[in-house]
Image (cartoon, rainbow, N blue to C red):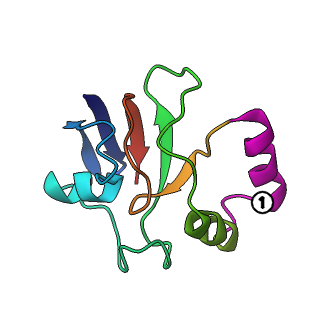
Amino acid sequence: MALVTFTSPEYRDKTVYAVAGSHTQTVLKLALENKIPINFECEDGECGTCVVKVSSIDNKLQRMGGPLTEKEKTVLKQLGKVTQMELEQMIVDDLPSEWRLACQMIVRDEDIRVEY
């Protein structure tokens, strides 16, 4: 089980359990199931309204979810959250992106903080 702490300046932090490795439970799905008000529209990784900032709870370099999908790369670049150079460096250094789309990020077996 993974612990996911959702945090927002407008709402009190809320920590929930996630079934790690389900390959179907996205951060957005987890938020909706727990009545956490993350903005979203398309739920398909194309609009960018569900962009969130993800970090490791214990500040270790962890995977922080599965790799970026191609949709995420495109939308995050359009939103100015990542550059092509940063995307290439993430691959070389095997580092995660702190910016993700909640509808695309699959929760892994790690405790994370999701800022929305």
**Rendering coords of residue 71 (x, y %):** 57, 70
Chief secondary structure of the magenta span? helix
The residue that label 1 is drawn on is: 83
Nearest to the observer: residue 103 or residue 91 = 91
Nearest to the observer: residue 78 or residue 105 = 105
Q: Neighbour class for label 1 at 10 Å: few (<14), some, many (≥20)? A: some
- Residue located at (38% from left, 63% from top): 103
Residue 57 falls in which quadrant of the image?
Answer: top left
Which residue in the rendered view is the most extreme toward the left?
Answer: 34
Residue 81 falls in which quadrant of the image?
Answer: bottom right
Label tally: 1
The correct choice, above or below, for 72 with respect to 105 in the image is below
Residue 93 shown in magenta: yes
In the rendered structure, the answer to whether residue 74 lies left or right of residue 105 reads right
- Residue located at (43% from left, 60% from top): 104
**Rendering coords of residue 97 (x, y %):** 62, 46
Helix, strand, or loop for circle 1?
loop
**What span is in magenta?**
80-94
Locate the N terminus by quadrant.
top left
Residue 91 shown in magenta: yes
Locate the C terminus by quadrant.
bottom left
Circle 1: residue type: Thr
In the rendered structure, the answer to whether residue 43 lies left or right of residue 75 reads left
- Residue located at (58% from left, 45% from top): 98
Nearest to the observer: residue 26 or residue 99 = 26
- Residue located at (29% from left, 30% from top): 2
